[in-house]
Image (tube, rainbow, N blue to C red):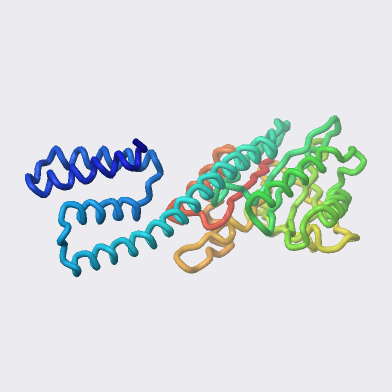
Amino acid sequence: MEPYQMNFSNYRSLLKKYIETEDESSLYQAEQFSKLSMQHNISPEEIVNIHIQALQEIYPDMPGDIHTAMNFLLETMISYGLAYQEFQSLREKQVELESEISIAANMQQTLLSTTVPDVEGLEIGAVSVPAHRMNGDYFHFVTDGSKNIGIAIADVIGKGIPAALAMSMIKYSLDSFPDTMRSPSITLENLNRVVERNVDSSMFITMFYGLFNYETNVLSYSSAGHEPGFYYCAAKDEFMEIKGNGIVLGVLDQTNYEEFEVEMSDGDMVVLLTDGVTECRLGDNFIESNEVLEVIRQYMHLPAQEAVDSVFRHFERLQEFQLRDDFTLIFLKK
């Protein structure tokens, strides 16, 4: 006999036995019937229909009201079955999407990995933590045979997998530029053309690019609409804002970026960050810039990497471990 017919016969016998004896062994066998039904993809409304047919055979003279009520249950379960199938389909798609996002996040970590350079006379600390699975922030260090160290920090206006792909393109473009194109202004001009030609028009990228010469102790830099950083002057024991006037990457094909310089003395520090740091929230209010600097002051005496980690943990606690935006922070300590 076919499994469906065999199950119906078993179910009718079980139901009749349970009605007559209320034996719990019948409930256990009904559980096995349910599992077998699932294995053969029998829907909930089919089980209800089996139940109705079994009742009609057990009670041929079943009152009309009971029969109508059971038909009502059957119609209800038909709607439930359709909704459940749709739910299962959406759930399967969600699981598949989660798997793809997990793979993409791991690929992003691999593609965007960078090595913090060991520079004589300069301590470098960097931390970048995504608010969600994919990181819309990015930082990268470019080293070559020259006396310069390139420092890039960027933020994609737009998140998810497209942002990760855009960041990967930025990184490999940076690595491919020859030494003659390493100056911050020229670097941003070239990256701007890359982004404008290859990235969707709805996605823009803010970026700060600096070049530190460890023989002259000069940091030259340009900004493409990026969050202003800070320069700490040890001699004056004060922070000053450092910012550029350039437009974000990808808006115009031909864009020029102004270049600035900071000469660092012993004890000086440059702080680079994304808006996930300056736009931390306390309740519904954004934290003020002077409050950010107060937190930095608490930890700036520590080694650079320990300091940025401590600042991150401070803001993480402040937001009750729920980051609202990607958080990236870099310290350059002379």
Q: Nearer the viewer, residue 84 or 41?
A: 41
Tell me residue 304's x, y (percent): 60, 39
- Residue at image point 79% right, 34% down: 143
Residue 318 appears anywhere in the view: no
- Res 214 quadrant in image: top right
Tell me residue 167's x, y (percent): 72, 47
Callout count:
0
Give the quadrant of the C terminus: top right
80 relative to 131, above or below: below
74 relative to 21, above or below: below
Residue 190 falls left or right of residue 266: right
Residue 108 appears anywhere in the view: yes
- Residue at image point 66% right, 42% down: 333
- Res 111 quadrant in image: top right
- Residue at image point 73% right, 43% down: 168
Name of the residue lying farthest toward the left: 21
Name of the residue lying farthest toward the right: 180
Give the quadrant of the N terminus: top left
Residue 46 falls left or right of residue 306: left
